[in-house]
Image (cartoon, coloured by chain):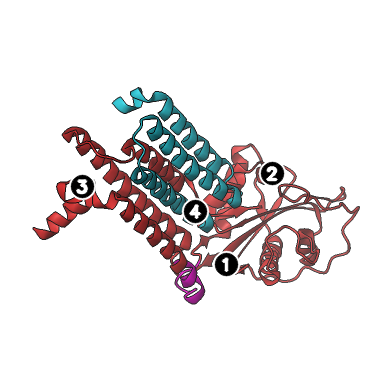
Amino acid sequence: MQFFELVKHLFVPHTTNNQKAKLLHSESLFFIAVGLIVFQLLLGFGRKTFPQVLGYAANISPSEVIRLTNVQRADNGLSPVTESTILDAAALAKGNDMLAKDYWAHFAPDGTTPWSFFLKFGYKYSYAGENLARDFQDASSTVTAWMNSPSHRENMLNPNYKDIGIGVVEGNLAGVDTTIIVQFFGAPLSGESVIPVVQAKEGLVPSVTSSPSPSPTPTPVEVVASVQTTPKMSPFASTKNVSLLVTGILILLLSIDLIIVRRKRIARIGGKTLAHLAYLGMILAVLLILKAGQII
Amino acid sequence: MKSITKDLSHYLALFGILFAAFAGLIIFSYDKNFQIAVGLALSASYVAWGVTHHYIHHDLHFETFLEYLVIAALGFVLIFGVIVRT
């Protein structure tokens, strides 16, 4: 009985809570906000202290990225690109280079270009392109993000490309555990001019050389089929779920409050429940739409 | 619903603020700093809306102001946490 009274006190407008659910009182909302901030601080602390538990949990299969890329190309009337083990290795090397030198860009701080990885592994190109992604949970959301970006889409649907290589690497980038996906496109050199193309927002098109410098013999490559990480708690998913839960409960409480106050015609001093509902409803919509992952 | 029709202009302004912030947060999803700025602007605008609305209705009290402030801050904390983790 005491428990029932407590629930009523916390969730329903009643005489014990001054006709307003205790959880909707300003001081309760303040403590909820403080609780969320503490949760974020603990997540940050947990990532550093228990990286094996709190890290980025991704399951990106390179073959799935290639399959989905070809689905997009087929949908746009283009011929499929063929997986090249050389480009796979080059993409993997690019990913590892980003982790080793701690950068998130098409060009390394020391000036290393994406194309140097093509040549390093013996891929003499007539056309070459690169798409980068990080922090996506799966291949589908990655390809969707690329397709939604005009410049990356242009790369995905470039009819000049014949080959594709995917590299997926996991590691720490600027202090954050992350999964990087490198997508290399290429067409082997067959006499035409060399036109490297990099997908980025601006100013990243490299200077064009008339012909690539002689490249070393293709190196035997070892291609990682996919990255299967051990299950971890994703900080993004944890934050999103907790935020959705808190917002959902508050919206439910405000809805109950709105109905009861209207029915009982309770007069009280305070903000407009309808306005709070609209505000939190919009927050809920944003929380539902926001997704993890960045592309360049 | 009665209060919406009674204060239609007020609620239209509120929905305008909410829609503009929603669009800003989605369209500029590639720029975290801008998203955080939009979140802050949304929270501040919500408090301003609440204060203006109750001031016009002559029922603005400190408790009411505090309620809008706390709800706005809570909303900001909710989206800020997710934005920084994307």
Task: Let me know if marks 2 and 1 both belong to one chain.
Answer: yes
Residue A176 is tagged as 1
Q: Which residue is mark 4?
A: B80
Q: Kindly report which numbered mark, 2 or 1, lies closer to the viewer in this rendering.
A: 1
The percent position of residue B6, horizontal first and vertical second, equals 34, 23
Which residue is nearer to you in this view: B20 or A276? A276
- Is residue B1 visible in the rendered image? The answer is no
Which residue is nearer to you in this view: A44 or A38? A38
Task: Let me know if marks 3 and 2 both belong to one chain.
Answer: yes
Q: Answer few, some or many: residues within 10 Å of disc 2's Cα (few below 14, many 20 plus, some between 14 and 19).
A: some
Query: Of helix, strand and loop, which one carries label 2?
Result: helix
Which chain is drawn using red? A
Amino acid type of the residue that numbered disc 1 sits on in the rendered structure:
Val
The percent position of residue A117, horizontal first and vertical second, equals 76, 64
Q: Kindly report which numbered mark, 4 or 1, lies closer to the viewer in this rendering.
A: 4
Q: Which residue is mark 2?
A: A151
First in residue order: circle 1 vs circle 3: 3
Query: Of helix, strand and loop, which one carries label 1?
Result: strand
Which residue is nearer to you in this view: A205 or A6? A6
Task: Let me know if marks 2 and 4 both belong to one chain.
Answer: no
Q: Residue at x 34, y 53 (%)?
A: A29
First in residue order: circle 2 vs circle 1: 2
